[in-house]
Amino acid sequence: MATKSSTAAASRRKALSLHIGLNSVSAAAYEGWDGPLAACEFDANDMAALARTRGIKPSVLLTKKATRGAVLSGMRSAAKALKAGDLFFLSYSGHGGQVPDTNHDEPDKKDETWCLYDGQLVDDELYLELSRFAAGVRVLVLSDSCHSGSVTRERNPPPPPPGQRPKLMPIAVGLRVYGAHKAFYDKLQAEVAKAAGKPVADPDAALAQVALTGPAAQAVALVGAFKPAVLLISGCQDNQTSMDGEHNGAFTEQLLKVWNQGAFSGSYAAFHARIRAAMPASQSPNLFALGPAAPFVAQAPFTV
């Protein structure tokens, strides 16, 4: 039973969210490729609408406004505003990509990226920004893109079924983009490693070390730099593709169906399991946690 003090503490909690959806990217930043998609802006708006129903104050960045600067500014603003007990909800819908790993924190020699409008956000940057939230802040990340899984990186995703749009920057495009902007991405990774004081602990690498000996939650013990409790539910494994749709991406569509306008009852772990069970074998959403996240994983989704 909740006490008066615990109820009062809950009522004082703050919750902010940032929702990113890109139906295209700037061809100037991606060597002529504009990455057309159909449902990503719908995904971002639907996640913002969900957030509002839970008492979370959302911000939305769509396509041309979803720049590297705007996304980083939004995350940093939230990190400054939130304290222990508060919630930050971050969602991304768009293409995933890769750049060569130059700070040697990735076993497959590649860093995964979110393809923002004017350039890629490298996963090292994302993890560093997440680690800057205060101790006790809960951070939920929903990523409906490719290269958003955990540990399987041995092979490239198979081609999608005819007529379907994968949310994946083509490998040839990625190579051209990196070749044209090598100095920028190499410097960026070096600056992230310097800011962290060491190579950023990558949750994918941590999970790879424990995949054969225990559940993914054990990875938390390997990533000591994370003071906040971070939970990521992603659209697919790294050897799969997340599919676009007409109104929602496949992952976001099933997430909303399972959520059922708040009728879902259960924990984040059960939420992920239900979403995964509803998806085809070709797209298996993943879940991993960083920091002291065990109580967070056990909470009802989107609880402020």
Image (spheres, helix red, strand yellow):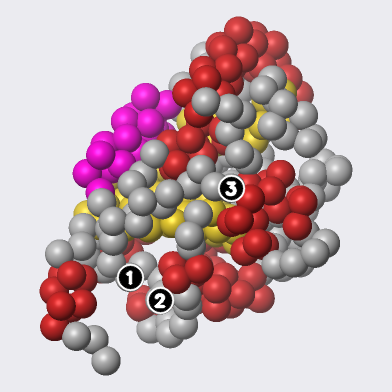
Of tags 3 and 2, the one toward the viewer is 3
Say which of 257 and 179 sits in front: 179
Mark 1 → mark 2, Cα distance in angstroms: 6 Å
Looking at this rendering, what residue extends furthest in the right direction? 155
Judging depth in this view, the residue of 130 and 47 nearest the camera is: 130
Residue shown at 76% from the left, 51% from the top? 208
Q: Tell me the residue at 43%/36% (across/down).
A: 129
Q: Few, some or many C-alpha atoms within 10 Å of disc 2 (few <14, some 14-19, many ≥20)?
A: some
Residue in the image at 20% along x and 62% along y:
13
Q: Where residue 269 sits in the image (x, y, percent)?
A: 55, 73
- The answer to the question of whether label 1 and label 2 lie on touching residues, with beta carbons closer than 8 A, is yes
Q: Is residue 274 magenta?
A: no
State left or right for residue 61 relative to residue 164: left
Q: Amino acid at mark 2?
A: Ala
CA gap between label 1 and label 3 equals: 25 Å
Disc 1: CA contacts within 10 A as few (<14), some (14-19) or many (>=20):
few
Residue 50 position (above or below residue 191):
below
Q: Residue at x 35, y 38 (%)?
A: 75
Q: Earlier in the sequence, mark 3 or mark 2?
A: 3
> Where does residue 38 sit, x and y in percent of width and height?
51, 45
Dividing the picture into quarters, in which one does residue 14 lie? Answer: bottom left
Q: Does the CB distance between marks 1 and 3 fall below 8 Å?
A: no
> Which label sits in the foreground, 1 or 3?
3
- Residue 198 can be seen in this image: yes
Part of the protein shown in magenta? 60-82
Which residue is the site of mark 3? 223
Identify the main secondary structure in magenta: helix
What amino acid type is highlighted by mark number 1?
Thr
Q: Amino acid at mark 3?
A: Val
Q: Which residue is mark 2?
A: 300
- Residue 160 in view in this figure: no
Quarter of the figure that contains the C terminus: bottom left
